[in-house]
Every structure is written in C-alpha cells, then in structure tokens.
Amino acid sequence: MSKSVSLLTAIFGPLAIAFLCACAISAQVQAASLKNSNILSVLNDFEPPPPMPLSAKAIIAAFLKSEAETRDALNQHTFKRDVVLQTIGPNGAVTGEYIRNSQFLFDDRGNRIERVIYHPSSTIRELRVTKEDIQDLAGAQLLGVDIAETGKYRLNYLGTELVDSRTAFVIDVASSTTPDPQNMKARFFVGRVWVDTNTFRVIKVKGIVEPQGKQRFPIFETWRGAVTDALVFPNLTTADQILRFPNRDVHYRINVKYYNYKRFASKVTVTEIDPSASE
C-alpha cells in the first residue's frame, strides 16, 4: 500500500466510523419513536368498558335515598301554592271554579301550617270538592309516593324513557294492600315515577289517588324543577279528565302551581290545617 493510501485511511477511517455510528443511533431513535407512536395510538384508541348496569333493586334504593333527602330539604322550606280546580262544559267553557291560594309557613313550634291567602266561594256545581281533594293536594299530588311508609307500596322498575330531553328510570308504584273505601283518610298513590338517571331525583310523577269510594279523582301529573343546583322541588300539578259518576259525567281540570321556596332554619314535621273544603 502506498503512503498516499495509508494517509487517506488514517484521515477518513475515523470519520467513516463516526458516520456509521451516527446512522445507527439515528435508526435506533426512529425505531423507538415509531414504537412509542404505536403505543400512544393504541392507548388513544382504547375505550374503557361500559359501566355495569344497575340492578332494579339498586335503582329503587337510590331513588328512595334521594327522595328522602328531597323530603327532608322540603321540610325546611316555606313556599306558596296556588290551586285552581275547574269544571268544563261541553263547549269547553269553564262552568265552575274553586280557588285556594296559600302560603305554607311554620308556627312557633316549627310545624308547617297552611295559611290561606285567597279563597273565594266555589262556583262549582257539578260536583263537590271534598276534604279528600284537599288532602290529596298537600299529599300525593304534591309528592307522590309516601316514602315514610314504603311498606304501603310495591315498587317495580320498568326501564328507561326519554322525558323532557332527559333519560329517566321509570318506577311503577302500586299499593301493597287493597285501599279501603271505608277508610278514605288512608290515601294511596298509584301510578309511576320518572327519576333522573344521573341524580336519581324525581322529574315527574303521574297517577291517581285511591281509594275513591263514591267519589271520583282524576289522573294527575306533577312536575319538579330546580330551585337551586342541589334542590329539585314540585312546581306544577295538572289534571284534565272526564270523571265518570253513576248518573253523570263531569269534565274536571286541576292546575296547581308551587313557587317562592325559601329556606327555614329549623327541621320540622308536616301537618295540615283547614282540611275542610268550601262548596
């Protein structure tokens, strides 16, 4: 080998080795980057399995727990209620009207009382507004199921429905015993409850109050609305139905508004006053 070749080897040999090492390192970096990219792609494409559906028993238990909290909160609020009961003639005109506007307050012992603000004489003639009608206004038509006495009811989960753009659990409510028409004071809500699937708060209740005895009561619907971010209380009850009496039919309409909820500092129990109804 000539001196010139040896000189070139001495000069460029290290450079060639360095170049080859650099190429090898670059290839390793690219391979690692590609591997990491594939890992990230797999991670990004990964979807966690859907949550296991709740059992019917768990849904009903969660509803009862949420409803107990709502009742407890409601028992710490005053509110106003405007009641309009009407009979409707064949041409759609109002033939009679019963108005009862009240404020639900607390007495010195912390018991809720109804203070009637406006209650003119009833002009309804086709039927009689009874004490059971007034009892239902403050009971089942306001709240639905009496959760303090869950033994009175059979609760069955029916599935889900879309209500007012929200998915709701549907719970069927039936009395566990046959309502006794000889004991009209013992009132039973029979119907369904729609419960928000996220919060387990009631969206609405729909049903009828039994027993009926010789009276007739309409199917009603009570909606609830947000009072605060944490509280959902009743805001509207409606009914519009033909009541079938033995000797006549009466078109009957109910419209009840609940509003002006205000917190009261003390925990209370609920009582009713002035249960009698005007003719």
Image (cartoon, rainbow, N blue to C red):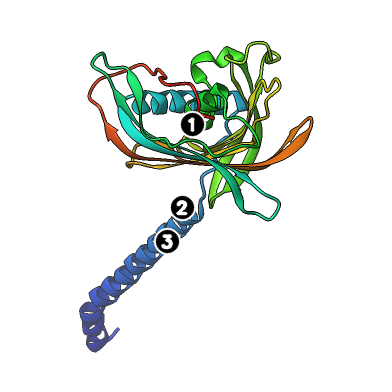
Say how many tags the image has: 3
Residue 58 seen from this side: no
Query: Considering the numbered disc 2 on the image, is that residue within a helix, a strand or a loop?
Result: helix
- Secondary element at tag 1: helix
Quote the CA–CA distance across marks 3 and 1.
59 Å
Q: Residues within 10 Å of mark 3 (few under 14, many from 20)?
A: few
Please provide percent x and percent y for residue 120.
43, 37
Choose between 163 and 31: the one closer to the eye. 163
Q: Is residue 210 above or below residue 103?
A: above
Q: Is residue 23 above or below residue 118?
A: below
Q: Gap in Å between the C-alphas at discs 1 and 2? A: 51 Å
Report the front residue among 234 and 137.
137
- Looking at the image, residue 226 lies above or below residue 140: below
Farthest residue to the right: give it: 247
Q: Relative to 128, is 89 above or below?
A: below
Where does the image place residue 264, in percent across and percent down from the top left?
25, 27
What residue would you read off at disc 1? Answer: 142
Mark 2 highlights which residue?
43
Q: Residue 249: x percent and y percent?
A: 74, 39
Look at discs 2 and 3 and give the one toward the viewer: 2
Task: Give, as a three-letter code, the residue at label 3.
Answer: Ser
Tag nearer the camera, 3 or 1: 1
How packed is label 2: few (under 14 Cα within 10 Å), some, or many (20 or more)?
few
Q: Earlier in the sequence, mark 2 or mark 3?
A: 3
